[in-house]
Amino acid sequence: MISVNRNLQIVRASAVYDLVVTAGFMTPWTALLVFEGFAALSAALALGRAVPTLDITAMLFANLLGSIVVVWSIWRLVQPSRSVGLYDALARVLFAAWQLFAVAHGASFLILGFTVFEVAFAIAQLLPTHNPRAVQTQASPEGSGLGAR
């Protein structure tokens, strides 16, 4: 179990990570630079799977994704909570599933680097939190309403 404060730190850390990783996808111009960088890295590492050039429709979806993830990240920075972290964990499980699907169907192995972070942050945000009041209530029969009447 982790503390509630630690959980909120994880929610914020995942938001910062998402801002850094996805801000470049918000505009067609920056997304083009990101994809060119991925292509160069993939070639330098000799991964053997090309990073595609996006057509205008694929670019639109990349920009929409970048925009919504940046807004979601800002929300998690400004209003972190356990429930927001749980929703984020669900989104990360979905992202990881689609990333694995893409790699299994020929996408660049670079995606797996992002998948590691998706899974790690999902697990971290799903860890149970320690609620000191609940533990104290359970340890004290008279505080739990289970004591003698």
Image: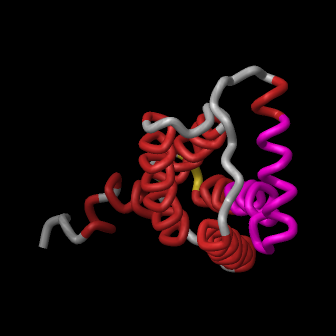
Q: Is 59 situated left or right of 2 in this image?
A: right
Residue 90 in view (yes/no): yes
Instruction: Identify the residue at the far left of this view.
Output: 149
In this rendered view, identify the residue nearer to me: 82 or 56.
56
Q: Position of residue 41 (x, y in %)?
A: 82, 34
**Residue at 53% from the left image edge and 63% from the top image edge:** 88
Is residue 94 depicted above or below 26 in this figure? above
> For the point 52% across and 42% down, which residue is it?
119
Residue 17 image point, x, y percent: 75, 54
Secondary structure of the magenta portion, mostly? helix
Q: Nearer the viewer, residue 135 or 46?
A: 46
Toward the viewer: 3 or 101? Answer: 101
Please say whether residue 77 is one of the residues in the magenta stretch: no
- Quadrant housing the C terminus: bottom left
Residue appearing at x 75%, y 20% in the figure: 46
Q: Quadrant of residue 145?
A: bottom left
Q: Is residue 132 above or below residue 43?
A: below
- Percent of width and height locating residue 122: 51, 49
Side (left or right) of 1 relative to 117: left
Percent position (x, y) of residue 28? Answer: 79, 71
Query: Relative to 79, is 119 on the left or the right?
Result: left
The quarter of the picture where residue 5 lies is bottom right
Q: Which residue is farthest top?
A: 46
Q: Is residue 76 visible?
A: no
Q: Is residue 113 left or right of residue 27?
A: left
- Magenta range: 13-40
Name the one closer to the observer, 45 or 86: 45
Residue 21 in magenta? yes
Q: Is residue 42 above or below residue 131?
A: above
- The image quadrant of residue 22 is bottom right
